[in-house]
Every structure is written in C-alpha cells, then in structure tokens.
Image (cartoon, rainbow, N blue to C red):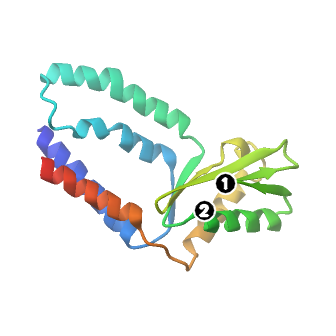
Amino acid sequence: MFKTIFTLIALLMILFGLIIMTRKKFMMRSEKIKVIVALMPLLAPSINFIEDVYIGIILVVIIPMMAIAIMVGRNKYFIVNINNEMISSLLMDILKEKNISYEERKKKLILTDYDNRTISYTQSLNTVELNLKEVKHLYFYKELKEELKYRIENINTSIFPSFGVFMIGLGLLFLVII
C-alpha cells in the first residue's frame, strides 16, 4: 500500500515538474507547497516501522507540521518561472500606478505611507516567494494581488525552468528508490 502511495506522489512530482517545464508563469499559495514538503517524510520507504507506530508518527509529527506550515504560509505566494527582477519591476509598476509611495531595499519594498509595511520577495531557482503578510489588511491588497497575477501571466520573458528539472529529477529518484 505504501509503495502505491509513494509511486503516486513521485508521479505527481514529475507531472508538476513537467507543468513547470512549459515555462508558463503562475502564482500559487505558499501553504500548498509547504504541505507537500511536510508530507515528504512519508516518502521514506526505508523506514520499516510497524503500521501502528508509523501512523502514530504521522499523527504526532507530520500533521502538526502541516498545520504550522499552513499558519506560517498565509499570505505568502510562490510565483513559478520568474525571477526577482521581474517581480520587483511588476510590483513597482503597480504601486506607481496606484500612487503608493515606496522605498526599494534589498529584496523588499517598503510602503512609506503605510507605517513602513513591507512587501518582500526571495528567489530560489526559478521560483520567487512573495510575502504579502504585512499588507493584507490594507485597502489595496486584493487589487494588488489580482493585478500581479494578471501581469505575471502576460510576461513574455522566459527563464530556464530549473525548479521543473529539480521536481522531475526528485520524482524519478523516488521512483527508482521505490
């Protein structure tokens, strides 16, 4: 049974990697990725516990990890097939159009008229994690998020989808190990 689950998860990782390899840009909530990462310990086929002990480990360790990942990941987004420069210029363009003053610092924009709240972003491979936690209660939050999604989808510049290659490789590795 576990072998079937591991195979299914590995195939889903490969499918996700193939989707990323299309170089389509999209934005997804951070909680989804963090829950998947929290489920990674389930992929350890070398663990030969009795099923009751394994279920106990799942209940005690993995479920709280997923709950924490969901709570910590709120209002954070992963944007795939994009880099820091692209997201930075998009955010600055949107803020300029809305006449919102900001200051640009290393990997963050500080909204000077709104108690110095920040919008930060971090790049990993060809994926950017965008943190909108501090601006979630501001009146323009939903507009900013929707405008950003729209503009991300319409970017013509493409970068090498290294995260897709990584996901395909990881999925193949899990298939080989199983």
Does 73 sit above or below residue 99? above
Which of the two labelled residues, at mark 2 and mark 1, occupies the earlier sequence position?
Answer: 2
On residue 107, which mark appears?
1
Work out whether residue 162 can be spotted. Answer: yes
Instruction: Classify residue 93 as left or right of residue 67.
Output: right
List x then y, in percent, for residue 43: 23, 40
Instruction: Classify residue 44 as left or right of residue 25.
Output: left
Please state the total of marks drawn on the protein image.
Answer: 2
| Residue furthest to the bottom | 156
Does 42 sit above or below residue 169? above
Instruction: Classify residue 26 as left or right of residue 163.
Output: right
Q: Answer with the quarter of the image where residue 16 lies.
A: bottom left
Residue at x 33% of width, y 64% of height:
165
List x then y, in percent, for residue 171: 24, 55
Q: In this view of the protein, which residue sits in the foreground, 23 or 83?
A: 83
Question: What is the distance, in whole Å, between disc 2 and disc 1 at their CAs?
Answer: 8 Å
Q: Answer with the quarter of the image where residue 15 lies.
A: bottom left
Q: Do residues under tags 2 and 1 come within 8 Å of each other at their CB atoms?
A: yes
Does 68 sit above or below residue 96? above
List x then y, in percent, for residue 6: 19, 45
Work out whether residue 16 can be spotted. Answer: no
At numbered mark 1, what does the secondary structure look like: helix, strand or loop?
A: loop
Crowding around mark 1 (Cα neighbors within 10 Å: few <14, some 14 to 19, many 20+) is some
Residue at x 40% of width, y 65% of height:
162
Crowding around mark 2 (Cα neighbors within 10 Å: few <14, some 14 to 19, many 20+) is some
List x then y, in percent, for residue 90: 68, 67
Q: Name the residue under label 2.
A: 84
Three-letter code for the amino acid on which mark 2 is drawn: Asn
